[in-house]
Amino acid sequence: MNFCWPCGTRALNGCSFSVPGPGLWMLVGSNGSGKSTLFRMIGGLIQPQSGQVDCCVKTSLVFQNPDHQLLLPSCGSDLLLNLHPNLTPSIKKERIAHLLEQVGLAGMAGRQIHTLSGGQKQRLAIAGALASDAKLLLLDEPTALLDPASQNSVLAAVQQLCHRSRNPLTALWITHRLDELDHADGAACMNQGKIGPWEKGLSLRRRLKALA
Ligand SMILES: Nc1ncnc2c1ncn2[C@@H]1O[C@H](COP(=O)(O)OP(=O)(O)OP(=O)(O)O)[C@@H](O)[C@H]1O
Ligand SMILES: [Mg+2]
């Protein structure tokens, strides 16, 4: 895939890769290497000028700051927004309870969003992605604004969703926090609009740290 922004910046330059299957796949790369542009393309927000995205599952983007994507006052009402409108009220209630449970927020449907911690908000944003039936989560530096404990809680929630025995999810996760790479099923480095091969997260982390 190739992509230039209208200002002439070439953000993707012969970028080609495939995701091996369900699991947690991480991308690292310096500022401006094209990671967020690639996510916008996979999520269908922009189209490549040449090449194509072959993605047959529903995708959902999760950004750095959950405050930019949580819209309603309570956890339950926010999730309701992402559910199919034709579901009956009792099914909606059941689904909301299940979604909250899946991200470690069981019983918090009535909780006001402004009272949640950063990690809880980010996990609620992930539950919103699941509510929309997304099978591919695109997480763009989801832990950048979080302290270490909240960072771990978000990472653990996504790992659990990607490794569950029934319908495991696929997650692509952008990070600048090299320690997170150890938890990936595979990791790749993006450089000047291209992605390198998948490798073990631990080895990529060691290699990048040695270069730093
Ligand atoms: N909306 C836009 N309009 C014009 N140029 C853009 C736009 N978004 C990104 N770019 C440019 O495209 C290039 C790639 O940016 P992108 O945001 O994809 O990088 P990134 O790898 O996500 O960086 P970071 O790690 O800082 O988030 C950069 O040169 C950037 O300035
Ligand atoms: Mg970015």
Image (tube, rainbow, N blue to C red):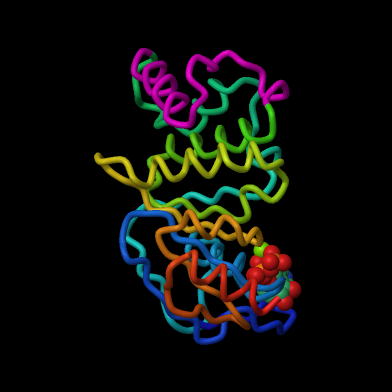
- Toward which corner of the image does residue 89 lie, by quadrant? top left
Name the residue at 57% across, 76% down. Answer: 207
In this rendering, the answer to whether 84 lies above or below 47 is above
Q: Position of residue 131 (x, y in %)?
A: 43, 34
Specify whether residue 129 is painted magenta.
no
Name the residue at 51% across, 28% down. Answer: 79
Looking at the rendering, the stretch of residues picked out in magenta corresponds to 90-116
In this rendering, the answer to whether 54 lies above or below 3 is above
Q: Nearer the viewer, residue 60 or 152?
A: 152
Residue at the farthest left position:
166
The quadrant of the picture showing ligand 1 is bottom right
Q: Nearer the viewer, residue 132 or 25?
A: 25
Q: Position of residue 103 (x, y in %)?
A: 48, 31
Name the residue at 56% across, 63% down. Answer: 40
Number of marks in the rendered image: 0
Image quarter hosting the C terminus: bottom right
In the image: residue 2, left or right of residue 164: right
Q: Nearer the viewer, residue 198 or 79?
A: 198
Q: Position of residue 84 (x, y in %)?
A: 40, 32
- Toward which corner of the image does residue 161 lie, by quadrant? top left
Specify whether residue 91 is painted magenta.
yes
In this rendering, the answer to whether 44 lies above or below 33 is above
Name the residue at 70% across, 74% down. Answer: 32
